Image (cartoon, rainbow, N blue to C red):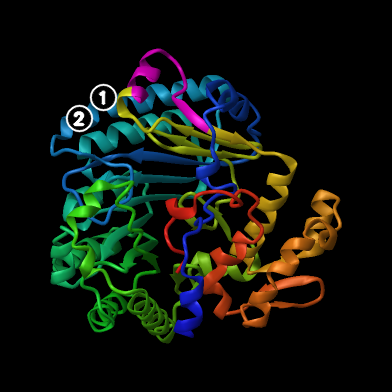
Amino acid sequence: MEIELLKQYSKPGPRYTSYPAATAFTPDVGAEDYSMLLRDIDPARAISLYYHIPFCRNICYFCACNVIYTKNKEKAEPYIAALTREMDLVAEQTQARLKVEQLHWGGGTPSFLSHEQMNMLMAQIYRRYDFVPGAEISIELDPRETSPEQIGTLADLGFNRASLGVQDFDPSVQTAVNRIQPEDITEQAYNHLRARGFRSINFDLIYGLPLQTVDTFAKTMEKVVGFRPDRISIFNFAYVPWLKKHQLRMNKEDLPSTETRLQILSYAVDRLQKAGYVHIGMDHFALPDDELTVSLRDGSLRRNFQGYSTRGGTELIGFGVTSIGEFNSGYAQNTKSLVDYYRAIEAGRLPTERGLILTQDDRLRKAVIRQLITGLELKFETIEQAFDVRFEEYFARELEAVGEFVDQGMLRFANRSLCVTEQGRFVIRNICMVFDAYLLGQNQGRYSNTV
């Protein structure tokens, strides 16, 4: 990768886990709109479920997630009760018993829950939904907060995929971000997951953290490659202290420069590819035989709020505080306040705080961005057939704007298609931004840098 070239594209932009991005959601969309979206779900098609478990025992200074810090596991008891009631409120709208092909517990730290709490929540989920054979059931785990017994509980409950938060193995970096995680703790969690038959394990890494250098991260990469996880995500650190005040506890002067940060990314990508990992797109890598890689090859790869997915084309219902649901006609997000969430559930109301009902233009641009970000190719004819438009006319401005990516070898035109090159995968967010109608006049400082 040409570092100087990437530097010019390192600017704030959406991650495109949705289009429009969640920053475009409006409070004009409330519980009644969410009810309509739920009623429109086709019961003949399997869906995805997401459960947000917001609790964490300790604060990681880099974190930009919606988290509630507590060491008291009893605080999860009323939350699970509220999740159960929310599932009933949703079922009143969907009416039919729905089939599920993808379930994910995210956070926060889902491994915060006790064995009894995990059993309680999963029992309530199984009571209300039917899981199709081979369903993907995944969870985010903090290796510091899990145990062989907990992993055994998860396996018995049907979980078959896990994502381990690693970030960086360097002790100085871990100290700087207040996440002390010795390598042997990660190794134990990884080995126990393998022993219990989890069919896919992902490592989450972050580049751009305080005190990181190319040399220190190279040592982390050697250890990661040695584990040989099925998938690896390397996220760009989102430094947003105006949104997450705890990030001010880090020394800003310790953050690597833009050039160093991109050199770290360049090294990591090169090392992973030499180790046989396939660059799926953006910040995701997978082994050649992993389902993500197979989906990339056969064109079935999708993207949703959990990132790249083999099952992301389904409609998604989100449960819990701050969760987002994605439907054919729009999005609905729950309140970010735990107090407001409890208040809505106790009143028998869906806890919807904001969302978006898609226009025809939204649907069209969503299809364009999805093609680019999951298939690395945009076929004009496919869009024309789906939306009855003449692509070159509808997107005349955008086609002129992507000319700079073509000139720099990031894109190429071929047979009325736009194809993303290997170099272009690193700036795919920038390419998608050209087709984003919501960015004009919007404060982009709320986003993380694209590379």
Q: Going by the image, does 226 lie left or right of 446?
A: left
| Left or right placement of residue 18 versus residue 104 in this view | right
Residue at the spot x=41%, y=30% of the render? 335
Q: Quadrant of residue 213?
A: bottom left
Please check the rendered image and state whether residue 192 is part of the magenta-colored stretch, yes or no.
no
The amino acid pointed to by label 2 is: Lys
Does the stretch in magenta take in 352? yes
Is 5 placed above or below 317 here?
below
Q: Which is more toward the observer, 189 or 21? A: 21
Q: Helix or strand or loop: what does disc 2 sit on?
A: helix
Task: Give me the residue at 32% from left, 66% from top.
Answer: 206
- Circle 1 residues within 10 Å: few <14, some 14–19, many ≥20: few
> Seen in the image, is 211 located left or right of residue 413?
left
Q: What residue is shown with label 2?
A: 75
Q: Residue at x 45, y 51 (%)?
A: 306
Q: Is residue 409 above or below residue 16?
A: below
Q: Measuring from the top left, give residue 341's x and y in whole percent.
A: 36, 25
Span highlighted in magenta in the image: 340-354
Name the residue located 72 percent from the left edge and 71 percent from the top edge: 418
Q: Residue 67 appears at what percent x and percent y?
A: 28, 42
Type of amino acid at the residue the image marks with label 1: Pro
The x, y position of residue 451, in whole percent, is: 45, 69
Is residue 282 in view from this perspective? yes
Q: Mark 1 points at which residue?
A: 78
